[in-house]
Image (spheres, coloured by chain):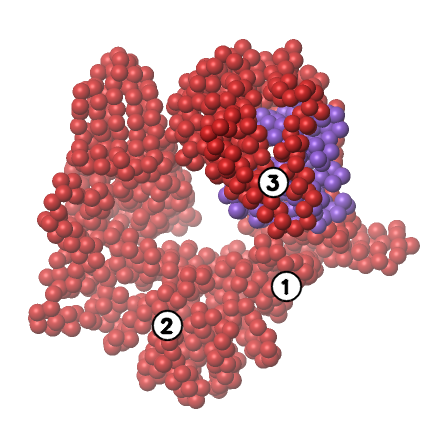
Chain colours: A red, B purple
Amino acid sequence: MSDIVEKTLTALPGLFLQNQSVGGPAGVKASFSSRLGGLVRGITALTSKHEEEKLIQQELSNLKATVSAPATTLKMMKECMVRLIYCEMLGYDASFGYIHAIKLAQQGNLLEKRVGYLAVSLFLHENHELLLLLVNTVVKDLQSTNLVEVCMALTIVSQIFPREMIPAVLPLIEDKLQHSKEIIRRKAVLALYKFHLIAPNQVQHIHIKFRKALCDRDVGVMAASLHIYFRMIKENPSAYKDLTGSFVTILKQVVGGKLPVDFNYHSVPAPWLQIQLLRILGLLGKDDQRTSELMYDVLDESLRRAELNHNVTYGLKALTYVIQQDPTLALQHQMTIIECLDHPDPIIKRETLELLYRITNAQNITVIVQKMLEYLHQSKEEYIIVNLVGKIAELAEKYAPDNAWFIQTMNAVFSVGGDVMHPDIPNNFMRLLAEGFDDETEDQQLRLYAVQSYLTLLDVENVFYPQKFLQVMSWVLGEYYYLLDKDTPEEVLTKLYKLLMNASVSSETKAWLIAAVTKLTSQAHSSNIVERLIQEFTISLDTCMRQHAFELKHLRENVELMKSLLPVDKSCEDMVVDASLSFLDGFVAEELSQGAAPYKPHHQRQEEKLSQEKVLNFEPYGLSFSSSGFTGRQSPAGISLGSDISGNSAETGLKETNGLKLEGIKKLWGKEGYLPKKEGKTGDETEAPPVPQESIIMETVDQTLIKKDQCQVLTQSKEEKEKQLLASSLFVGLGSESTVNLLGKADTVSHKFRRKSKIKETKSGETTSAHNRTCSYFSSSSNATYEDGYYLDTLQDRGDKELNKLSLNSGLLDSESLTELPSVEKLSNCKLSSSPSLFTDNSMEGFQPSQSTALSVANETSLAASLLEETSEHMHSDLVEVCHNETISLSSFKIWKDDCLFMVWSVSNKSGLELESADLEIAPAENFKITEQPGCRLPIIEAESIKTFQYSVQVEKPFTEGNLSGFINYQMMDTHSVQLEFSVNLSLLDFIRPLKISTENFGKLWLSFANDVKQNIKVSESQAALPSALKTLQQKLRLHVVEIIGNEGLLACQLLPSIPCLLHFRVHGDVLALWFRSSCSTLPDCLLYQCQKVMEGS
Amino acid sequence: MIKFFLMVNKQGQTRLAKYYEHVEINKRTVLETEVIKSCLSRSNEQCSFIEFKDFKLICRRYAALLIVVGVNDTENEMAIYEFIHNFVEVLDEYFSRVSELDVSFFKAVSQVFLSTWQSTGVVLIRFYF
């Protein structure tokens, strides 16, 4: 019955269409064929794109004249609109008609309105400014008594609607959920689905009504609500577990054919509905045995009824997924796979390779990689190349059978992948060569082989290698040429020189080349080529090359220094640099005594400049917002005025080291006597690759299997045999269950070349870097019990020691200005180009954050000094225990500082034993930036004592609920390490601070912000009074009350670090009208949500 | 999620285009040209699903008319493949016998269908009148 009503409703416009013209389909044709039909036929008849363009341009100019003529009736307008739609669909701009489309939707009769809405939905997009003009029409139509008009309005809302105007129509649409007509209910659900997509916070309160829609007696409404549920469950599966039963029941009914026959598609009951339901059940049952059990029956039933389809790719895809679960299954289909591999369709071929990639193991690697390379040589599309090259590199790294194969494969990867491949590939390759793996002699052989192969490659005349490949070559030659044991590197220098002179080599690559030359020069005694090179490049126009050439020239004059600076085979080791430039102290003192102005850090200079401007600024609200936002971040205590020289330079030193040491940067320069490698090795031995015996057995089993196969098919053609052979080489090692994990995804795979985790090394290894020490000194010096006023009292004292150590280090290195060379080198490289490469990439990483960390270091210095007052001065939460066991207990609390959220975790050792080490690691979270070093290591926690870890947390983008998780790792004497996980909830409110601005400033800012959200919320009577509402907002949300005018209030706050948000609110009876504005698009939404929560909660 | 729905003829002329995600008009032309090229170059024996950049194309040919649907990674290819057929069946029934020219004639009408039945890029249960 309901279907019939629906059919009539939707057929209405069609009927109108027919009635208006002569009647019947033929009549429609006639009215259209005059204009649109003529246009379409005209275009079809044309042969060239050029003619088409001419025709359409002419059509468009005709249309333009017609639509803007005042005499044009709405009926004519409708006809024009259809033609405009067609022109725009062909890719020609028809923007002059947009406004007329909106007008048509506003003014036309039913049919004209329909065309108007259709045109709007095709022409405009969600952020189009003209869309706002449509809002009124939509609101009017939603209230119309004509069902067709309501339907049209709902349709347009579910297609495009300006996000900020949602509150205007939301109540109307909610009402429609109770409408007596199914089609209206369904469209209302779809409109709400759209709102959920673009502004989930605004429809949060209607969740209950969605449940009603799910239970609607009409299948269409229920099906529409599934889309909303799919999204909501995807975000938070645990909240909807109770609905599993309902979904299962629905699926049972669908599969059981309980739906009207109408919904059958080729006798399958509502297949798309089934798919959607299965997706939802998949989300609900994931990692949840109990919930999953509820669905087994129905899943079995659906599977039984589903007809299998035989589109090959699809089958392969399915197989690929299945194989992830059980690789042995691939064996049953091996001949199909082989056939697919030779399939003329490249797409099927690629899917096959994808499958092969999953079943790769140490035994079939060579064949599979060969197949992949073959495909790679044929394909032209960049996307495929990038993808495939990455896979080959990954496989080669994991399963390479021997050195020669590995290097040759990588050579192929580099020369084909060229400059499009992911920068990680060459980076990883070089890191692998540098860091080596378990066996030192094998390492050397690999390196030696690489050097030899590159030398041969460079010998070939007239071959152009991609820039990335050349960079890899030059790095390897520079680092490991010495392995060749030749007296002089003259031969390779000649080659490098030739490349340097080659015009087709990019300047970035040239920097790599000259770096290699520099390294080689330290091994050579004298070389004409180097001299020639210096001569050529000291006059080069390229600043970077000139810099390199000068460095090389000066270094050559001091061979001893050069050798210490560029030691052989020390590329993995970090070099200590006196970044504080303390050797310049004397010079600075001298200059100061001669009357030079003391150095001021950049931010201080800016601040001064700003304050000077303030004096001259006569505008009443000249104080710009950003300045107030930034001053908060610079704590004055961290800025020394430069009167104390060593203090000053040390501060910059701290910043520098911080910047340099941020990541696991690969250094090209090393220092003697540093042994992080040893440690890494012992670690690796423990997880030595599994014994290959099993795989050998397996292989024989496999071969016997294949032999059996071959016996059975003795009459097979030669071709078939070849295929069999291929199959046996491809599927070797897949037979037995006891085999190594074949998926390559799990960590248990024995990598042939295993990379050591550099990050781990820096974290756990003995670290000489100044930054790490500062870091641990910050944390270890705060090892006091959590009590007010027991913080970091010795900090100042230790700080001084730290500085002493720093300058001590600088004393160790040779003096002369050359000590700063590596950093200069990095800088110049950094400027070189923005295209990612190992070197530039790292130095960029190293340098960019240093600005912000510099600030934070400055903060910390002050923080350390002032932490004593901190806890009493700032609001802070109670100490909450986040995890514990019999040995330790971890508690945390938040300090809401003015410029950041400061999280303190305190570890208390409850046992009577000393903890050897304790490690707190915070997992990187999506929305947050944890400004301090994420891993901290306290060497020792004594018995029954407490130590604390401190992190400052910043938000990267607004959110509603967040959570910071991590784990603590500790080790007791003679026992293995224990790991405890914990997580702490963060709310947006943790990052909201009052923004103290004047009313004038408020007005000014209000106008400048583009993003706003309005919402009315009902509150209880006690809340409705302005003062109490204000109080709640002020206290719970930390908003600053700017001014109160009658029953309106102005409030302001900022999201740290400095995103302002303004709130205007008005009390009207028991309704609170809230209006948020901000420069950030998502912040108002999130704040509104918090506001609602607070007002409802109180 | 469906990203776009395209109907083109054998000559590569666009007959109908509907985007469910905003794409700038000049980018549309480029995208359509590429999509049509990669679909038309395929023979009937070849697979109907194409991985194209970061999304998937599902194409189905009806005489001189080619229907291409672009979907994102989470969409099921087979579901869309059948959905296209469903769509054509509906057109066929509605216009008694649909031909390429009919489609262009009644493009506006079929637009109405498309917009009504799969508003935000999700496939509802099926088409019906």
Residue A491 sits above or below residue A375 on the image = below
Q: For the C terminus of chain A, give its image quadrant.
A: top left
Choose between A305 and A59: the one closer to the eye: A59
Picture residue at 47% right of the left edge, 18% below the top: A141
Q: Which residue is mark 1?
A: A401
For the residues labelled 1 and 3, the Cα–Cα distance comes to 42 Å
Q: Chain of mark 3?
A: B
Percent position of residue A1032, x then y: 23, 23
- Mark nearest the camera among 1 and 3 is 3
Labels 2 and 3 touching (C-beta < 8 A):
no
Q: Residue at x 70, y 32 (%)?
A: B102
Q: In the image, A526: left or right of A701?
A: left
Q: Kindly indicate whether the residues beneath marks 1 and 3 are on one polypeptide chain.
A: no
The residue beneath circle 3 is B70
Q: Secondary structure at mark 3?
A: strand
User: Mark 2 falls on what kind of element?
Assistant: helix
Going by the numbered disc 3, the residue's amino acid type is Gly
From the top left corner, tell me how far across and down residue A375 is, in percent.
Answer: 68, 58
Q: Pick the residue in front: A509 or B61.
A: B61
Q: Label 2 amino acid?
A: Cys
Residue name at image x 60 percent, y 27 percent: B112
Snapshot quadrant of residue A1039: top left
Q: Are marks 1 and 2 on the same chain?
A: yes
Earlier in the chain: of badge 1 and badge 2, it is 1
Q: Disc 2 designates what residue?
A: A544
Instruction: Identify the residue at image location x=59%, y=75%.
Output: A463
